[in-house]
Image (cartoon, rainbow, N blue to C red):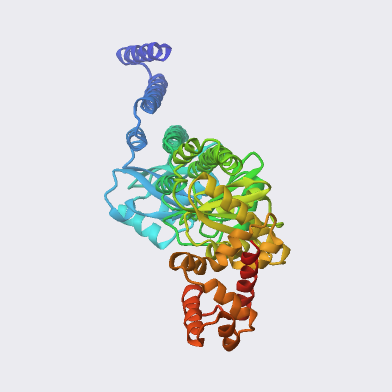
Amino acid sequence: MTAVVAGSDAVRQLLDLLATEASGERLARARELALRIENTLAAHRRREAHLTALFETASDLTRLHDPDEVLRSIVHRARMLLGADVSYLTLNDEPAGKTYMRVTEGSVSALFQQVRLGMGEGLGGLVAQTARPYATAGYMSDARFHHTGPIDAAVREEGLVAILGVPLALAEKVIGVLYAADRAPREWAAEEVALLSSLANHAAVALDNARLLDEISAHNAALRRAASAHDRLADLVLRGGDIPEVAAAVADVLHGGIIVFDASDTELARIGAEPMPPPVAAIAAARSSGRSVSTSDGWVCAVLAGPELLGSLVLTGRPALTDADRRLFERASVVTALLFLLRRSVAQAEEQVRGELLADLLTTPDRNPAALLARARRLGIDLAAAHTVLVAHTDGVSRRRLAMACARYAALVGVHAERVVLLSPDPSPGPLAGKLAAELSSTLDTAVTVGASGPAAGPVAIAGAHDEASRCLRALLSLGRHGHGAALSELGFVGQLLGNRTNLADYIRATLGPVLDYDARRGTELVHTLRTYFECGGNLTRAKDVLHVHVNTVVQRLDRVAALLGDDWQRPDRALEIQLALRLHSLS
């Protein structure tokens, strides 16, 4: 206001001097004073316009949400306020070591709009490298700058002569350059450099705000995605989903392949991945660090319950993970641990129920057979159907681990009287015992011995078969046949001699049963003929004299014995079994 008043007084004074025909010297002094005042007023008007532009730019930062729109507004104001032919803004590409064109106004050259400057190249590259403003009245002839063919060609095609560039800086970091340029020589005033620097600072703030908003948005999106994935996995577990279902959900969320291993490195599920051995070293590293670890093709996370290793998750096809995806993968391992623990709790509860059923079945089978049958049906077992009973023993592992290994072979398995007992629907006790002994010994890497009996149907018969299977196991162990499996009938009289609580009637029945039944049905004397034949040392002539029959009759009877007992009945070991059974039969 003072400057305006002073200007008015100076104009009146100048007019008074002219009216009074004052001397030329006084007129010159008055004219000089008026011009100074006019320049001051013009400077005030420029500063007011600059401040208005800065306030409007600050308003844009709060009003506009699109960073490109804010940058275009800043570039436009720079051109208008500095009266430049062209204004433009470049941003740094740090990995490439370049600065590239982001926004232009007033440019007519496509080549110029696509130019990229290396750090230190041209005026802009030097500003980006040094974080200092640079100005030139004639760029092409200015030797301060590192001229390159592509940059000079772009400047020449645009027709630029005078260029001013100031850095866009955040703290000590330069993220780009803001320019004003003319197509004619021009000296850039200090206040113009200051104004462009202020606009550049606003542009830097706009870019930083956009970056922060993007980060916040990405973080929120990652949180929503993680929460959604966690809810999805937890819902699977609570609805009773199994491990393959959880693995499929994790694979879908992380867009990769998933393999689930248990604590013994057994594969439990595999979705979208090729078969592979468990990465033991990576699992150990993940277990010790408590975080997922990277491998050549993916990631590994230990499934832990406190310090206890329950298993592991292997993610394939994802060599790199964002922090959000890595946390999601680790969260999936927590949900998998929950599933493992739930499965263990269910297994322990079911094991207890099955163990109680097995104990009652083998100790008091005749107390309430109907209740035993009903309890078994609730577990999906039909005790009224025929089952083979097997008893397994090993000194190499715990009975619990042996029972877990036996579970896949049995309808019912548990520990009774310090032995692992199995009930299987397989009707062949001897072959089944041999198969189990071989496979369990291989699986557990220790000798497993299995005695078998049956098949037997109903609680009482099953309990009796268990007694016989236990005697068979004791006989096998007494014979030193560790790691083998057999039924008592396959051991013959040796099993009867070495097994406790010998059942001679069963042995006689197992050895001579078909011949005894034939005599009983037909009223024949095959047992008497067989005994006489052995007592005569296998001599047919002596045997027919003792029996008082023709020799052909003896031959016919022995042929019938062969049909009933098998063609190998005269093999030395079979003959010994038959003779012993005949002697026991005569004594009984």
Residue 483 visible in the snapshot: no
Which of 419 and 367 lies nearest the eye of the viewer? 367
Q: Could you say where residue 172 lies in the image, as x and y percent from the top left?
A: 57, 39
Which quarter of the figure is the N terminus placed in?
top left
How many numbered tags mark residues here? 0
Q: Considering only vertical position in the picture, is 497 above or below 501?
A: below
Q: Is 34 on the left-hand or right-hand side of 481?
A: left
Q: Residue at x 44, y 38 (%)?
A: 240
- Horizontal side of residue 130 vs 88, given as left or right: right
Q: Nearer the viewer, residue 98 or 329?
A: 329
Q: Which quadrant would residue 358 be assigned to in this image?
A: top right
Q: Nearer the viewer, residue 159 or 407?
A: 407
Q: Is residue 564 visible?
A: yes
**Picture residue at 31% right of the left edge, 52% below the top:** 158
Residue most toward the front?
548
Q: Position of residue 45 (x, y in %)?
A: 37, 23
Q: Nearer the viewer, residue 136 or 128?
A: 128
Residue 198 x, y percent position in the rendering: 45, 32
Q: Quadrant of the C terminus?
A: bottom right
**Residue 321 placed where, x, y %?**
49, 49
Q: Residue furthest bottom?
A: 541
